[in-house]
Image (tube, rainbow, N blue to C red):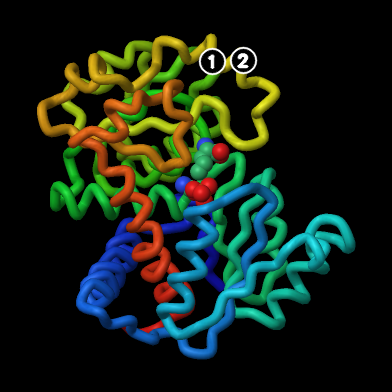
Amino acid sequence: MRHLLAMTDLKPGEIERIFSITVDLKTKFEQGVREALLPGRVMAMLFEKKSLRTRVSFEAAMVHLGGSAMFLGAEAGFGSRESLEDFARVLSEYVDVIVVRAYRHDTVVKMANVASCSVINGLTDYAHPCQAMADLFTLRELVGRLEGHTLAFVGDGNNVARSLAVGCGKMGMRFVMATPEGYRFDGKFLARLAREVPKLELVVTGDPAEAVQGAVAVYTDVWTSMGQEAESEQRRRDFAGYQVNAALMAKAPRGAFFMHCLPAHRGEEVTDEVIDGPQSVVVRQAANRMHVQKGILAWLLGAQA
Ligand code: CP
Ligand code: NVA
């Protein structure tokens, strides 16, 4: 039984396979064809946190593939009525795949350990693999081969940054982070990177201007992630010099893309000028969430593309 809990679950060849299914499905979709690769398959969706992109793109993806998506709200009792394990054991008897957005990464791990169907992480405090997959796919559409390119990440060493770092390592890209001390990857994650993606070239700096030099794209995410709202004042102070604005983009190579997983806190990590500007590919990233998740679902559920 395969799950997608973190980017470390995928080998480079598997990422390529998912991308090739995605290219095929996206091309057909753009031609008006919604290929029903997963007829009769059922996906359950559980969200402990808010979501626009992940929730809607997964649901639309499954419907386009000929399957059905079931969003389970609070009345299902997830996390409140019975043990997580009992919940996952029973739910996985009814459905073919479960997408979970949880506060704690441990929640998706525990579910995957006992589920009789695939579990997909739709974001935890630790990782956001579906986002990283869509982002790498977007870059691949924009620049072709990813190998040798540098992705600059300016901001918090959070779930999105971790998944991107692993993804970059798997695809032969450099990952350069500009992050204040106290918000960088911890020793445990650095050890995991060294073990799982030994070829990753990771550079960590406190200087955003240094980070964006030579980058094919400049990526940022919110300074305060969901669940960290109590820290937002402190974080605004700590990240004050890390805004992606026109002055910072001017230090990146001409033609560098601006990327953001969204939702954005405009005026904090990014200015309107940059996110709405010609270098921004944020809507394309969001659109690709749906296409790449079709690839992930088709691959995980073993459909022939
Ligand atoms: N990028 C992303 O996961 O967006 P949502 O929180 O809206 O799902
Ligand atoms: N780092 C953000 C990503 C949202 C898609 C969060 O966890 O809130």
Q: Residue furthest right?
A: 81
Q: Residue at x 39, y 57 (%)?
A: 289
Which corner quadrant holds the N terminus?
bottom right
| Location of residue 120 (image quadrant) | bottom right
In this view of the protein, can residue 251 be seen by the observer? yes
Residue 252 placement (x, y as % from top left) = 18, 23
Q: Residue at x 50, y 38 (%)?
A: 192
Residue 278 placement (x, y as % from top left) = 18, 36
The residue nearer to you, when weighing 2 against 209, is: 209
Residue type at the position of mark 1: Arg
Relative to 235, 283 lies left or right = left
In the displayed structure, 251 sits above or below 119; it is above
| Location of residue 215 (image quadrant) | top left
Q: Is mark 1 within 8 Å of ligand 2?
A: no
Q: Does dot 2 land on a helix, a strand or a loop?
A: helix
Q: Residue at x 54, y 15 (%)?
A: 236
Q: In the drawing, what numbered circle is on residue 233?
A: 2
Q: Does dot 1 land on a helix, a strand or a loop?
A: helix
Residue contact between numbered discs 2 and 1, judged by CB atoms under 8 Å? yes
